Amino acid sequence: MNLLNIKDLNKNFKQENENKLEVLKGINLKIKEKEFISFIGPSGCGKSTLLNILAGLIPASSGQVMLKNKLIQNPGNDRVMVFQEAALFPWLTVIENVLFGLKIKKIDKKKAYQKALDQLEAVQLKNFKDSYPHQLSGGMKQRVAIARALVIDPEILLMDEPFGALDEQTRLMLHRQLIKLWQDTEKTIVFVTHNIREAVKLSDRIIVFGSNPGRIVEEFKIDIPQPRDRENPTLIRLENKILKLLEKEIKKQGEKKYEKIAT
Amino acid sequence: MKKLLPKTIFILLILAIWQFLFQLNIWPDFLFPSPQMVMITLIEGFKDGTFTFAITASFKRLLIGYSISLLFGLMLGVLIASFQLIEDTIGPFILALQSVPSVVWLPLALLWFSMGEKAIIFVVVLGGTWNMVINASTGIKNVQPVLIKAAKTMGVNKIQLFWKVILPAAVPHLITGMRLSWAFSWRALMAGELIGSGDGLGQILMWGRDMGNMSLVITVILLIGSIGYLTDNYLFKKAETVVLNRWGLNN
């Protein structure tokens, strides 16, 4: 069943010289329930903008996004977002951070505390529940951020380059944890990244974006069950294919810029 | 403990120079007292309760004025940070007011409120408010956008966003504002007490001048300096350090 339906979506930004910048043009996309879908593309292709529109943090210029039968216009805790910076509240302890969304939801105190504790256990940070964010490493902060989002039990988890600032080893460990959480909770995940290998390893489906104007270029389905082996030849082939596609996009954009300068 | 030695030597050196100047007999004793005379005034003053009484009286005014300026400053700061129109109109006005030493309002205040407490508290409020306004508005405007976005996707409404995210996120700036506000209120209070009536520290100082008792004047100056130093160093700096650490701003 389709959970999210993006229809004829456009997003323009006004520039100083009165020209409008087409950040997203003619986006049509259906996202299924329990799907792990990744957006990948060169910088400036609008993939993060689309994620922000899905979150309801910024409005689309035209077109619409439907979550089940509801039109998305504002942010809501049915679509929680995890950012590249963990964005934890520094004045709250780890468990208070995880409790934040539950308090907003007005869930009974005792129940909420137990839920938060269970969720921290799921990301293996129960022992750090009374620490403050500044005492944690980057990877630990990101795990708290994921716990804080999942504990709210959203329909969709939106992730904006969540592992982009982490070192390779931490990133690999978090990939394993995220896949396990995804399988246990059966959430729909929309994942923005510029790391092709990461997208190939995690996703059921990869949407490749091109820029100028930002649009969907191609999509790839991956039917290999999780957890996936990095050495799997199908994955490596797919990785190369996407890489070539992106190189072509980036080159095209470079030529366009060159034309602009030449004329 | 290592730092204690140079500090002690420094203080002894100052006392030695002071004593030396005293013994040169340039001024008569009552105009230029010796360290020993000041020490005696200090002990006597605390023994008969004069200083304790005066400090209590001063602090009462200070706390009233300071509380009002924090509240007023925070409210104005929030308004300035929230509405562009208010920032454009009141903003420059506040910067101008901040550069006016608040004691210059005293002649007016004395006429408006007569010689009483209210005039001095008025000056204290004017001394403390503007720094709080500026720091509160800066703090609120500089809250990391990603914190606000994160809170929004977790379903907060506007009121919750302000109380649970924006205000706590601004605390490091608010503490700085509180510290500066305190320092300026304290200065304003002393200036106000010199001119106004009552029984605070500033008035004891003026009383010393009227009686030709410079020993008392110097003692009160020392007290004013010590109280300012102790509150800043042991109350506000400590609070600031704790907050900066927790907010992860102290690397």
Image (cartoon, helix red, strand yellow):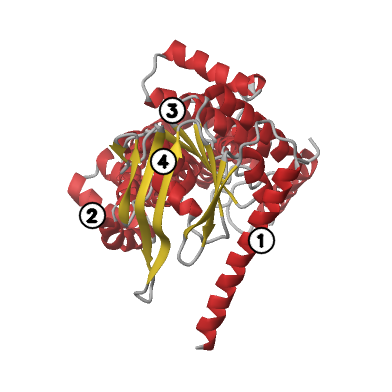
State the separation of the CA atoms marked 4 and 2: 38 Å
Residue identifier under label 4:
B166
State the separation of the CA atoms marked 1 and 2: 77 Å
Is residue A141 shown above or below B72?
A: above
- Point out the frontmost of discs 1 and 2: 1
Residue identifier under label 2:
B108
Q: Earlier in the sequence, mark 3 or mark 1?
A: 3
State the separation of the CA atoms marked 2 and 3: 52 Å
Residue identifier under label 3:
A101
Callout 2: chain: B
Question: Which of the 4 image quadrants contains residue B250?
Answer: top right
Q: Nearer the viewer, residue B38 or B245?
A: B245
Residue identifier under label 1:
A244
Callout 3: chain: A
State the separation of the CA atoms marked 1 and 4: 45 Å
Residue B249, x across and y down, in percent: 60, 44
Question: Which of the 4 image quadrants contains residue A121?
Answer: top right
Residues marked 2 and 3, same chain = no
Number of labels in the image equals 4
Q: Secondary structure at mark 3?
A: helix
